[in-house]
């Protein structure tokens, strides 16, 4: 059906014209005679055109309720609360926060390589051969070692103590200078060893390479965390103000619909009073329908924007807040502050965390290049050791005087053989056989671990002035 959007003047028109077939094939009869007002009648228009009361009733009963959203109890929300909740609920930020903690732990673990390490190794053993007595050996070795960061060197301080009753072990400890017997030999050793690379591993080694790379990785994870937080804040701010705009646009659309309804009432009143043509009703009704359609689209946009904001704020998919409407409490403010272009560019470059991450990746590559270049150098190390050794014996032996055996079978006794030979050569000779004195353990060697630790060196064990 075609509406002629024109208002005929209330003047005399001295012409008669015909309009072509409209709508369903019926031809409206338009007759304008002198002294008469213009009238337009169509059979189809009378059947299909809605009445004024129906148009106004349909406009006033427009349903703006959103499916699944309860508007009876809205949730007020400020921008700062929205940002805080989004940061707390964002899973990506939580993952990057865990990555930061993981890298911090890794850096701490790699730094532990340079911590001093103390070890103590006690050992007790007992051995016995068939027909012999059992021997018991006890050994406790202590060690303090540490890697040094600058230069790549390391030192090792040791303090070893041992007690042995085994003859073979005693010969090893004393280098064969003291016979074992039934006594136990105590030995102590205190010293330090230092190793210093001179070419390869001097400027950088594998430990420092891994530690430096781990520090850069930590900075990268921190950059990722900050970038994720900034992106989330940016999304929340944009969506929050989009929701404010969508709600205001919806309010404006409601006002437009109310104005169209009021205009329709006024046109109906004019038509009833004869001050307006009936065709004007169709124009205003069309305008009202268009504005109602815009209002429905604006309401849909409110739902879309509100759901986008809820996706940023709510972590639980079945939370009750999904069915509640959000009402922003902050109002947009406009500040006309002057902007310094150089300062703005500097701030923009400083806050581009993706660029900072690329710079850190470049630094990691430089560390690898430096390490592999260092590995091409010849390996020359300085190694030095200083130690103090002590020795003692327990139980201490006493001085014994023995009378040589000079009687018996000369073939079995060297002393008797020597005496018989002298008497054969000189029967009148007077032979005096002195007693044999076996000295006991020296006082500076008698004792246990206390004595061995007080002695400085095994080479000085024969000096009685100690």
Image (cartoon, grey):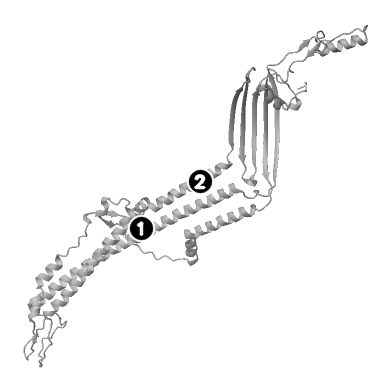
Q: Residue furthest bottom?
A: 14
Q: Quadrant of the C terminus?
A: top right
Q: Position of residue 153 (x, y in %)?
A: 65, 43
Q: Position of residue 70 (x, y in %)?
A: 21, 55
Tags 2 and 1 in contact by the CB under 8 Å rule?
no
Find numbered disc 1 in the image and state the secondary structure of the residue it sits on: helix
Closer to us: 344 or 422: 422
When asked about the image quadrant of residue 436, the answer is top right
Q: Is 10 left, or right, of 259 in this rendering?
A: left
Mark identifier at residue 215: none
Compared to residue 303, the image places residue 424 above or below, namely above
Residue that mark 1 sits on = 236
Closer to us: 74 or 365: 365
Question: Which residue is painted at 63% across and 46% down in the image?
Answer: 150
Residue that mark 2 sits on = 106
Question: Which residue is painted at 67% across and 37% down in the image?
Answer: 193
Q: Is residue 454 visible?
A: no
Q: CA distance from mark 2 to mark 1?
A: 33 Å
Find numbered disc 2 in the image and state the secondary structure of the residue it sits on: helix
Q: Is 247 left, or right, of 35 in this rendering?
A: right
Compared to residue 405, the image places residue 346 above or below, namely below
Answer few, some or many: residues within 10 Å of disc 1's Cα (few below 14, many 20 plus, some between 14 and 19).
Answer: many
Q: Quadrant of the N terminus?
A: bottom left
Answer few, some or many: residues within 10 Å of disc 2's Cα (few below 14, many 20 plus, some between 14 and 19).
Answer: some
Closer to us: 208 or 356: 208
Closer to us: 286 or 138: 138
Closer to the eye: label 2 or 1 = 2
When asked about the image quadrant of residue 59, the answer is bottom left
């Amino acid at each position: 059906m075609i509406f002629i959007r024109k208002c005929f003047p209330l003047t005399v028109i001295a012409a008669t014209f015909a309009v072509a077939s409209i709508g369903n094939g019926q031809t409206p009869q338009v007759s304008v005679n002198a002294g008469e007002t213009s009238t337009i009648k169509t059979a189809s228009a009378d059947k299909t055109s809605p009445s004024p009361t129906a148009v106004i009733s349909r406009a006033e009963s427009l349903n703006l309720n959103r499916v699944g959203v309860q508007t009876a109890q809205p949730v007020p929300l400020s921008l700062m609360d929205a940002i805080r909740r989004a940061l707390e609920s964002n899973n990506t930020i939580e993952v990057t926060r865990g990555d930061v903690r993981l890298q911090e732990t890794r850096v701490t673990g790699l730094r532990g390589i340079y911590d001093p390490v103390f070890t103590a190794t006690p050992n007790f053993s007992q051995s016995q051969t068939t027909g012999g007595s059992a021997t018991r050996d006890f050994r406790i070795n202590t060690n303090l070692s540490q890697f040094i960061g600058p230069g790549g060197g390391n030192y090792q301080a040791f303090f070893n103590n041992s007690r042995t009753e085994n003859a073979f072990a005693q010969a090893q400890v004393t280098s064969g200078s003291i016979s074992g017997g039934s006594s136990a030999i105590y030995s102590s050793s205190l010293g330090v060893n230092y190793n210093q690379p001179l070419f390869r591993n001097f400027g950088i080694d594998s430990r420092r390479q891994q530690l430096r790379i781990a520090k850069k990785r930590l900075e990268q994870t921190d950059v990722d965390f900050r970038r994720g937080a900034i992106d989330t804040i940016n999304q929340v701010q944009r969506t929050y103000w989009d929701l404010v705009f969508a709600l205001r646009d919806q309010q404006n659309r409601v006002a437009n619909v109310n104005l169209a309804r009021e205009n329709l009432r006024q046109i109906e009143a004019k038509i009833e009073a004869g001050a307006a043509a009936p065709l004007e009703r169709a124009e205003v009704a069309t305008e009202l329908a268009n504005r109602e359609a815009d209002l429905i689209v604006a309401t849909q946009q409110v739902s879309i924007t509100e759901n986008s904001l809820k996706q940023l704020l709510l972590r639980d998919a079945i939370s009750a807040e999904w069915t509640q409407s959000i009402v922003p409490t902050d109002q947009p403010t406009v500040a006309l502050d002057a902007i310094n272009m150089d300062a703005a560019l500097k701030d923009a470059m400083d806050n581009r965390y993706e660029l900072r991450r690329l710079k850190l990746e470049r630094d990691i590559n430089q560390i690898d290049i430096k390490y592999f270049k260092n590995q091409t150098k010849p390996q020359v190390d300085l190694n030095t050791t200083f130690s103090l050794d002590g020795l003692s014996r327990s139980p201490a032996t006493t001085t014994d005087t023995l009378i040589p055996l000079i009687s018996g079978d000369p073939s079995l006794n060297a002393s008797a053989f020597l005496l018989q030979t002298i008497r054969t050569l000189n029967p009148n000779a007077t032979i005096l056989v002195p007693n044999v004195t076996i000295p006991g353990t020296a006082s500076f060697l008698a004792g246990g671990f206390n004595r061995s630790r007080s002695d400085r060196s095994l080479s000085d064990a024969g000096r009685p002035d100690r």
